[in-house]
Image (spheres, rainbow, N blue to C red):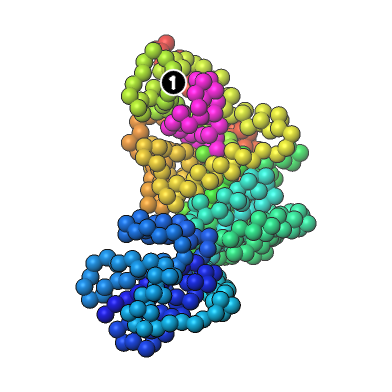
Amino acid sequence: MAKFVVAGRTNCPYCAKCEMVADYLAQSLPDFNVHKIGIHPENWQSWLQTTCTANNWEHEHSPIIWRELVDRGGKGSLLGGFNEFMEYVQGYYGYFSDMQTDSMIKIAKENFWTSIKEQQDEMSMRKNQIKPMSIWISGALNTACSILIPILISGEIFGENQLINLNLLDNEGSMSLLNGLQMEVEDMACPLLHKVSVHNSLRKPFMDADIIIILDDIAPDENQPIEDSYKSIINLYQNIGVKIDTFAKSGVRVIVTGDHVLNFKIHNLLQGAISIDRNNIIALSTQLEGETKALLAKKLKVNIQDVKNVIVWGNIGRTTYIDLHRARVHRYENAVWGPRGFSHSVMEVINDSEWIETEFQEAVHSHRTILQQMAIRPIGLSLANAIYKVLQYWYFDSPPGEILSLGVISKGEFNIPAGLMFSMPVRFCGGKWVIQTDIEISKKTQRKLQYIVQELKMEESLDFSHITEMDMGNSLTSVAEHSPESIGEIVQEEDKAKEEE
């Protein structure tokens, strides 16, 4: 028994005639089998080259026909093209086709459009089999959202076949602006964008959410009593937590961003999201880490990617400590060189601990404010990039040896009380973050972390229903006094006192 393979461009009239002849012989002769391969014209040349190379054949035109000896095994035997096949059929089987050229062209056109429809149907079937991922972005009128959207629906993070339902929420935001954003997203005509919707209320947010990105950033109002500002934050974020708990999927992943009291906001969000896995709710300190690396790279005159393992500890948007004890710099030009991958300690290269603990810390914490004052437009590039980086690591794991700063729930690591949201060094592995407990920290760093712990405890204990307004004012004033600079000063005073002893 012999099987003939007829392959050609789907719009090729000669291939169409070969297929008709082969079909007739297959119906008439019990030992004659045919397999047809139709290739889109745009893909034909590359397919033909690959096939000929694999079989050590030489052939240039459509169609190409070969014979496979089914009962003997082994690779196929090239017969040739249209002329060779017609001569073989006439000489071996005594069959001659009198199909006219007009009929050949007509059938070729039908074959072409049939193959296009089959491809579309197959693609549509695949899309229907893939359930769209639902992504919600709260604070959708934030500049970072517009930068982030093309990345989320590109297939780069979630896969080239993963459809996306994009839901854009901006509580009490302008529906006119949201509708304009929706139209702009739709105009991208991204094949992976299944649906986009916009919302400006918390009536039914986060429905069936797989991922929630919170870009909202409420800052305490200077014209409002501080206790009222904190009440507004508590009410909003507890409400957001309840909505996530009610409408989102149980395995939802939540990234919370912001420049103000971020740990406090997540603490209240968690009070509402009681059934959501706490390990799936994280605070973004990665943006601050990136800004720190940029400042160090500028001082050391290296590329930003050459600065590694900077750690951001603490209370994001309030009191954080930038730890450079584990930081490394690659490709730094000095007298000491090493093999590929060699790096220097950032602390040793700078060799100025006083500058690191004072001026550098102040420069990092004021960097974003200075940048916002310099920029003509709202900033958002570094925030969008930090979110992208976290999502990429969350789904595909951290690169070997690289740590990331992230606000996560403590389990007692580094003497930080369990259950406290705290920025710490982590790595992503298997879709989960893992705190890097192998990192050793100095006693000085430990004391700084404990000051921040006390600050967070004070924030979390602000129960407005059980304390007087005077107590509230005193507590908040005490918390506000613990800025990064004041904590550094307190630790320096303690160190000085110990040296004197």
Query: Could you say where residue 164 lies in the image, as x and y percent from the top left?
Result: 56, 61
Q: Quadrant of residue 258?
A: top right
Residue 231 visible from this viewpoint: no
Residue type, mark 1 in image: Tyr
Say left or right for 140 vs 291: right
Q: Quadrant of residue 208?
A: bottom right
At 51% from the left and 20% from the top, the residue drawn is 301
Relative to the observer, which residue lies in front, 50 or 342?
A: 50
Give the side of residue 75 with respect to residue 423, left or right: left
Task: Rate crowding at label 1 as few (under 14), some (14 to 19) or many (20 or more) other CA atoms within 10 Å.
Answer: many
Query: In the current view of this chain or complex, which residue is farthest to the bottom?
Result: 28
Residue 247 shows in this picture? yes
Quadrant (top left/top right/bottom left/bottom right) for the C terminus: top left
Give the vertical position of 188 relative to 98 (above or below): above
Q: Which residues are magenta?
A: 287-315
- From the viewer's side, name the closer residue of 253 and 493: 253
The residue that appears at 49% across and 82% down in the rendered structure is 98
The residue that mark 1 highlights is 332
Q: Is residue 433 above or below residue 292?
A: below
The percent coordinates of residue 398 (x first, y second) are: 41, 43
Does the segment drawn in magenta span residue 236? no
Q: Secondary structure at mark 1?
A: loop
Q: Is residue 306 magenta?
A: yes
Q: Looking at the image, which residue is at 21% across and 73% down?
A: 72
